[in-house]
Each structure stands twice: as structure tokens, then as C-alpha cells.
């Protein structure tokens, strides 16, 4: 029976899990599950989910998934899937899709999905509609439209899949769907044994490593001053350091600042850095590319200072200042110090 | 060793963008263009690899820079040549209408680039991990699939694993999430998408700019577009998620207003 919607779940790498002792699911895959269930409900079709890995490792995960409102949980097990490789995942999922014949395949938009899903889509003669921030139903008969961001969030683009008889692949952006909206229920677990051959897996990954443990935990900070590209030069950082000091705040940054080596990587906020939820996030010279926003949009209050009135940071700001940070920041520091 | 770097020309970060009257794409008429920054990191990695290959006794490496688009993309290719690329390939597409980049989907653009790469038979193909304009983040991986090459994404560092010769492998360090990284061995030829932060971008020197004028820029004609599997229905500015209160005035006034808010509403002072 055709599943209608198939959600591809992602687990945290088993070795990372061992180091962190954390949950097995990648957080965003639970959000993808909620998105897949919602899409299936809107279309009046069944939703199934798949999990890939070594058979023994995924059995408990598949069992846990069976307590969700799904038609089938596909446990895609093979020793060659014990460790993630793009080739292994692409081959296994191509076979699973041929078996299940879904109309839609929903992925979490993670680094791992970005690594293999475009290749899988190409193999199927399809395109991944990636980093989807919202799904809208429209038209008659009703069909889903997918909202993606262009120009780092300055524009929204609405996409539709139009290949007749094709399968629509989409990945959902972190934080766009609520994991706790995923519905409970009961479903069967079916094992799927993909045909994999070791020589088809061309890359050889080694153990994930994490350099020196973090010494800064921004996730517990009450007040954060975040600095971005707008600061211009390293020597100007003094301005925001002074402001952070006056506010009793931790200093954080967007990726370009850490890439340039102006601040250590552990102070980076965003999809490749830390996720923070302070009482106040004061964004200085940060345009608000989505990769940064996903790391800080949980802040209770956001104040943004930026010279570009069109900057996406203002979409999540409670208070905005369109102006020259080189004037506003020193003035604010003086005013705080009284 | 030959390295092809695929680069995209994108609107400048600060560009004011308008939507075309049909509401389906970006109005390009007043846009200032620049090299997609993630691709600039890919180019930098290629230039450093060229240097390291020479130092490691792997012979003279050639860096070929590749882009698809209308006439305007030649300024970005020239910039790459000025930074040190050896020659350029330009897959020429119309400015607008049928066959233009805006009309072609990401699969079709990757096809154009892959066709050009085929003609070169390089050992390495590098590109940025995503574009700053459409942000699909898949051109590199799609190209790898079309070319039948193994790939690694979000690469921070590339090492030559062994000595020269066919069948050699490279070792790359990939970025994973949450501060994790991982080494992966990849056989050559291969495609890598480069993450920022693994190297520092260079500027073109005056001498480089002068030399770039003498370097080869070959134009290739683009294949007829294939039917898109997806379609852009509408492009518009995003709705604001929050009601943002904008503060105006001189810096001192703004500072005073902010302090009041920080004290009485946000309560952090």
C-alpha cells in the first residue's frame, strides 16, 4: 500500500550519543515527523516513517516510533548502515522509496540530509525542495506549496512540485514545525533489508571528534550581546565588548566573525554553533541570515541595531534601531553606565 | 592535478531587491553582483591545494574556475583569475526568458556545470556549500551524482592522503553539527563542497588583476533547458513574525530610550 507520505528519521550518530549520553533522535527529525503527519492529514493519505542503521541499533528506535500515529514504521537495517555514508543512505532510501511508493518524502534539514538527499533526488530524477520553513495548502484539488527563503531571508519563495507521477522530496527547516505536535498512535513495524554492497560505499568516514570541551555555555546566559559582520574590523570589537561588560552580558557572534578568527568558535550562535534562549539578545550589526536566526529566535526579547532597514533580523526583533552601530553602541554603553 | 572550482555570481549582500512584475523572480536590472561567498572559500581552498600539491612534489596543479550565467558572470570569473585561478570556463545562458538561470531549476543548472566539468576530467571539483541567493545548498552534491563522483560536503580541510598516481585518495575534515567534525577518506576523482572558516580568503593583488587579463576565458554554449520538476509560484518579502517597534532619533536619544526599556520592560538593568 502506498504510504502517501514517508518521513525519513535521523538518529544522532551512535558515537556522538555515547559521548553526550543524550537522546537518540535528532531533534529536527521529530519536527519532520510532525510536518509529515500534518501533510498526510491535509491530503487524507497515510503517513509512514523510516529509520536507517544497523538492525540491532535501530530496533528500539523503531519500537518507539510505533507509538506514533503512523501507518508503518520501516526499520531499514544493515551492517553497512551502522555508520552514516552518503552512498549507503542514498542506495538504501532509493530502494525503500521504490518499495513504499510515497508521493512525498519529508526529511529534517540537517547537515546529514544536505549531504545525501540532493544525490537521492537526482537519482530519482527529482529535486529536493530544501530548508522548507512552512507548508501551505492551496488550489483545487488541494496541493501543498512549500515556502523557502531566498537571499538569506530577505525574500520568501513559494515552490510547488509539478512532475506528474513523481515523488516530491522536501526537507524542513529546524524550528519551523513543533516536535510536540507529533501525534501519538499505533503502527506496525516492518523490517526492510536493502541490497547493499560494500564496494558501492566509496567514502570511509572516521570517528566524529570534538575539539576541546566548550568553556563558554551561552545556553544559560540571561543576557547576550551578539555581533555580526557589520562590526567591520576586529579592532572595533572593543565597542561591543564594552557594551557586553556594561550589561553584564555574554558576548556571542554570527559565523563570519568566528570564521575570521576574531572571536573563538565557541561563541558562535546559530545552526553551526550554540542555540540560546536568553532574556535579552541584543544583535549588533547582524543581518539575520536564517543560519543565525535558528540559534537565537528563542530569546524572550530581541533588540537589533543594524544600518540596513531590510535586514531580516528586524523580522524577529521586538525593538529595532536602523542606524550606525558606531554611534549607537558607544552611546548606549555610556547611557547604561550612567 | 587539475581542480575545477564552480562559482556562482549572486546579488551583493546589501543589495536592495525588487521582485519582477510576474512575482516569480528577482528583478535583476539594478542589482550589483559579487562572487557567492561560500564559493570564494572553495576557490581559496583550490588555490591553497595547488600550492600544497607543488610543495608535496605532486607536480603542477591547475585551477580552472567555472560559472554559468549571462555575460555579467565574467566579472566574477575575472576576479577568480585575478586571485590566482589559471583559466576560466563560462557556460553562457541568456539574460532572461527561456534558458536563463531564473527559468532553469537547480537540477538543470547542475547539469550545465557537470557537462562543462566532463570536458575537463579533473581530479577534484570544488564548490561552496550553498549559494547566498537561493540557498538550495545542493548544486555540488547534484553535480557529484551526475558525474558519478564520490563527494564530501561541509569540508573544512583537505589533505593528500598518499602520493601521486591514479587511485589515490584524499582525507578531508568535514563539519558535523554541534561542534563535531569528522575525517573522511575519499577516492579521487571526487567532488567537495567547502565550508567557510577552514581557510582565510585572499584579496586579488594589482599584479594578479593585470595577469588575469591575459588568462584564458573560454565560452561554452549551454544545453537546451530540461523540464523543471519544481516551480516557483510566488516571491514576496516575508511577513514580520513580531511587531517590531522601531526607535529613531539621534544616537543619544535612542540610547536613552533603550536604557528605559532595558530597565523597566526587559528588566535586565
Image (tube, coloured by chain):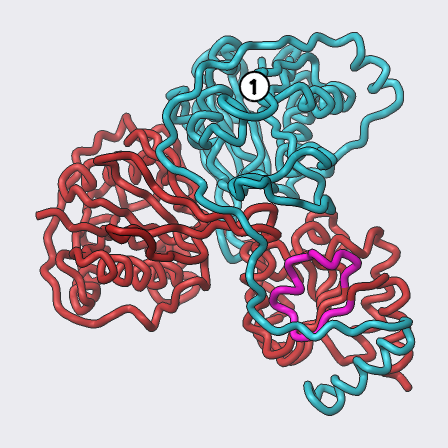
Give the chain ID for the red colour.
Answer: A
Q: Residue furthest bottom?
A: B264
Q: Residue furthest front?
A: B21
Q: Is residue B56 visible?
A: no
Q: Which residue is mark 1?
A: B93
Residue A147: within the magenta? no
User: What residue sits 69% from the left and 56% below the top?
Assistant: A310
Residue B80 x %, y % = 72, 23
Q: Which residues are magenta?
A: A306-321
Q: Is residue B18 visible?
A: yes
Residue B1 x %, y % = 58, 13
Q: Is residue A36 above or below residue B264?
A: above
The secondary element bearing badge 1 is classed as loop
Name the quarter where the C terminus of chain A is drawn: bottom right
Residue B125 x %, y % = 53, 23
Total labels drawn = 1
Q: Is residue A87 above or below residue B264?
A: above
> Residue B144 falls in which quadrant of the image?
top left
Chain label for disc 1: B
User: What residue sits 54% from the left and 61% below the top?
Assistant: A294
Colour that chain B carries in the picture: cyan
Amino acid at each position: 500500500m502506498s504510504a502517501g507520505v514517508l518521513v525519513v528519521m535521523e538518529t544522532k550518530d551512535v558515537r556522538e550519543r555515547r559521548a553526550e549520553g543524550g537522546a537518540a533522535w535528532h531533534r529536527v527529525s521529530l519536527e519532520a515527523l510532525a510536518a509529515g503527519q500534518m501533510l498526510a492529514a491535509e491530503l487524507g493519505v497515510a503517513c509512514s516513517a523510516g529509520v536507517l542503521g544497523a538492525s540491532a541499533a535501530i530496533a528500539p528506535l523503531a519500537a518507539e516510533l510505533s507509538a506514533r500515529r503512523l501507518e508503518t514504521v520501516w526499520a531499514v537495517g544493515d551492517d553497512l548502515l551502522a555508520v552514516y555514508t552518503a552512498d549507503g543512505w542514498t542506495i538504501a532510501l532509493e530502494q525503500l522509496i521504490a518499495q513504499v511508493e510515497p508521493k512525498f518524502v519529508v526529511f529534517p534539514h540537517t547537515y546529514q540530509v544536505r549531504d545525501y538527499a540532493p544525490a537521492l533526488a537526482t537519482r530519482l530524477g527529482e529535486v529536493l525542495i530544501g530548508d522548507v520553513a512552512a507548508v501551505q495548502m492551496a488550489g483545487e484539488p488541494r496541493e501543498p506549496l512549500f515556502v523557502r527563503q531566498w537571499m538569506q531571508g530577505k525574500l520568501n519563495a513559494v515552490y510547488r512540485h509539478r512532475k506528474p507521477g513523481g515523488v516530491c522530496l522536501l526537507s524542513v527547516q529546524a524550528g519551523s514545525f513543533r516536535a510536540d505536535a507529533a501525534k501519538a498512535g499505533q503502527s506496525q513495524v516492518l523490517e526492510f533489508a536493502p541490497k547493499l554492497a560494500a564496494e558501492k560505499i566509496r567514502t570511509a568516514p572516521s570517528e566524529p571528534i570534538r575539539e576541546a570541551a566548550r568553556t563558554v555555555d551561552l545556553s544559560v546566559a540571561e543576557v547576550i550581546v551578539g555581533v555580526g559582520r557589520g562590526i567591520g574590523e576586529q579592532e572595533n570589537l572593543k565597542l561591543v565588548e564594552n557594551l557586553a561588560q556594561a550589561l553584564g552580558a555574554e558576548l556571542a557572534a554570527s559565523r563570519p566573525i568566528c570564521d575570521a578568527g576574531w572571536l573563538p568558535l565557541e561563541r558562535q550562535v546559530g545552526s553551526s554553533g550554540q542555540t540560546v534562549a536568553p532574556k535579552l539578545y541584543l544583535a549588533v550589526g547582524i543581518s539575520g541570515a536564517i543560519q543565525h536566526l535558528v540559534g537565537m529566535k528563542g530569546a524572550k526579547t530581541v533588540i537589533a541595531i543594524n544600518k540596513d532597514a531590510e535586514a531580516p533580523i528586524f523580522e524577529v526583533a521586538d525593538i529595532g534601531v536602523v542606524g550606525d552601530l558606531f554611534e549607537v553602541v558607544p552611546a548606549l554603553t555610556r547611557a547604561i553606565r550612567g | 592535478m587539475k581542480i575545477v572550482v564552480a562559482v556562482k555570481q549572486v546579488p551583493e549582500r546589501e543589495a536592495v531587491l525588487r521582485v519582477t512584475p510576474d512575482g516569480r523572480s528577482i528583478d535583476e536590472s539594478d542589482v550589483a553582483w559579487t562572487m557567492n561567498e561560500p564559493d570564494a572559500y572553495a576557490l581559496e581552498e583550490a588555490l591553497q591545494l595547488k600550492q600544497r600539491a607543488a610543495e608535496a612534489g605532486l607536480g603542477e596543479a591547475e585551477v580552472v574556475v567555472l560559472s554559468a550565467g549571462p555575460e555579467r558572470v565574467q566579472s566574477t570569473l575575472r576576479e577568480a583569475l585575478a586571485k590566482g585561478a589559471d583559466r576560466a570556463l563560462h557556460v553562457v545562458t541568456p539574460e532572461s526568458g527561456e534558458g536563463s538561470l531564473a527559468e532553469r531549476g537547480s537540477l538543470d543548472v547542475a547539469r550545465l556545470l557537470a557537462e562543462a566539468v566532463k570536458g575537463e576530467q579533473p581530479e577534484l571539483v570544488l564548490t561552496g556549500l550553498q549559494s547566498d541567493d537561493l540557498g538550495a545548498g545542493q548544486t555540488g552534491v547534484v553535480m557529484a551524482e551526475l558525474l558519478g563522483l564520490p563527494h564530501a560536503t561541509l569540508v573544512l580541510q583537505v589533505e593528500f592522503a598518499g602520493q601521486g598516481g591514479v587511485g589515490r585518495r584524499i582525507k578531508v575534515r568535514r563539519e558535523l553539527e554541534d561542534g563535531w567534525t569528522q575525517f573522511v577518506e575519499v577516492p579521487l576523482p571526487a567532488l567537495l563542497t567547502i565550508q567557510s572558516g577552514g581557510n582565510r580568503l585572499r584579496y586579488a593583488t594589482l599584479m594578479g588583476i593585470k595577469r588575469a587579463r591575459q588568462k584564458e576565458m573560454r565560452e561554452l554554449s549551454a544545453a537546451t533547458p530540461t523540464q523543471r520538476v519544481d516551480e516557483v509560484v510566488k516571491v514576496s518579502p516575508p511577513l514580520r513574525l513580531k511587531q517590531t517597534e522601531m526607535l529613531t532619533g539621534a544616537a543619544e536619544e535612542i540610547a536613552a530610550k533603550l536604557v528605559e526599556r532595558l530597565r523597566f520592560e526587559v528588566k535586565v538593568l
